[in-house]
Amino acid sequence: MANFIDRRLNSKNKSTVNRQRFLRRYKNQIKKSVSDAINQRGVTDISSGENIVIPKKDMSEPIFHQGDGGIRDKVHPGNDQFVSGDKIKKPPNQQGQGSGQGDASDSGEGDDDFTFSISKEEYLNLLFEDLELPNLEKNQLDKLIEYKTVRSGFCAEGIPSNIDIVKSLQGSIARRIAMTATKRKQLNACNQALNLLKQNTNIHDSIQHKEEDELKKQIAELESKIAKVPFIDTFDLRYRNYAKQAMPTSKAVMFCLMDVSGSMDQATKEMAKRFYILLYLFLSRTYKNIEVVYIRHHTQAKEVDEHEFFYSQETGGTIVSSALKLMNDIICERYNDSQWNIYGAQASDGDNWADDSPLCKSILAKQILPKTRYFSYIEITQRSHQTLWQEYQQLKDSHSNFTTAHIKEVSDIYPIFRELFKKSNKRAA
């Protein structure tokens, strides 16, 4: 066997480059492990990355070796124990033998599956690759960006209530100093000359009086000119200026609505939980702060915590509109749609009181959808669709921020989620 050794010098940050090359090489295995890992997490558990396991059979790499040269004759041993049609007995169990392939050994180490950790950023990038929030671009000016009024210096025009007194007086002082500086210098010179003249006793009295009168006359004229300069002028007035500053919002609220009537078993709730986890993780890539509101309902709706939302048992019928009404009340009370980006996800097995389904459609169309950025309804059932699904299908055709999906088994969740949030061709281009 011949070994090839790369003796080129390692470049700076080579480990980072190697890691990215490794992630690209085993991308399919890593993405499968990442998609399976969401089953072990809580809805808001995104603080850590994930441990990825790759089977050792997928880690094999080609090697260079010397091939067998020339012509060789080989003799293979024959079978001297069995003939065609014999039945082979199952070998007895041996103490200490594990469930893996091969025999047990009293020395050496086996080959385990390869395990490594990925960061939170790598985890989310692999989980939501090629996905995007719908309608994000066309609504970002009026939904994602708010404007706040901020101070923006001073201006020469404005309304009286915005006059800045200090700035105006500073301008007035500066103007008066600039306009009277020469005259004040002349006035100081005249005063000094008058004082010297009064101290000089050698000059004839008539000449001294004449010069004093002339200086006094100049001093009076200069003082009069200085006094005529107005204390404040319209030119001095300064007004506080205000401007609108764009302030991108980073707050979002995610409403989780779920039917917990007697027809919803624990397996159905677990499938709904996985969808909620995916949605929360996806939103966390766009928004810095996300609040989650859990609303469970049967004939009545109630806001609960995460544990009660998924694991508390209820019985009775189903009235879906009770949850939609409570969601709208909470939005009006705590989450102003001009300050929060609102998302909703509703999970149900499709059961609902028939007369209540049109009311659900009306509440969504008139009260909830105008305030929300996106609302998704997932129906988890093996049965045919009922009135609630039919009413929601009409909303789907007329509202771009509303969608429905049908989930039959666990394996449908991630593909359907990717279908709901896949990038459109227009935006991808």
Image (cartoon, helix red, strand yellow):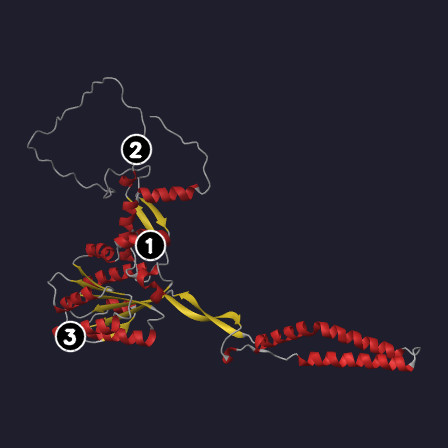
**28 vs 409: above or below:** above
Residue 282 at x, y = what percent? 31, 59
Name of the residue lying farthest toward the right? 202
Q: Which residue is mark 3?
A: 356
Residue found 66% across the figure and 79% down from its top: 229
Q: Secondary structure at mark 3?
A: helix
Q: Name the N-terminal-most of marks 2 and 3.
A: 2
* Placement of the N terminus among the 4 image quadrants: top left
Residue that numbered label 1 is attached to: 124
Q: Where residue 250 sits in the image (x, y, percent)?
A: 38, 64
Residue named by callout 2: 62
Residue at the left extreme of this rendering: 85
Asked which quadrant contains residue 337, the reply is: bottom left
Bin the neighbour count of mark 1 within 10 Å (Cα to Cα): few under 14, some 14-19, many 20 and up. many
Label 1 vs label 3: CA separation? Answer: 39 Å
Residue 212 is left or right of residue 96, and the answer is right
Q: Earlier in the sequence, mark 1 or mark 3?
A: 1
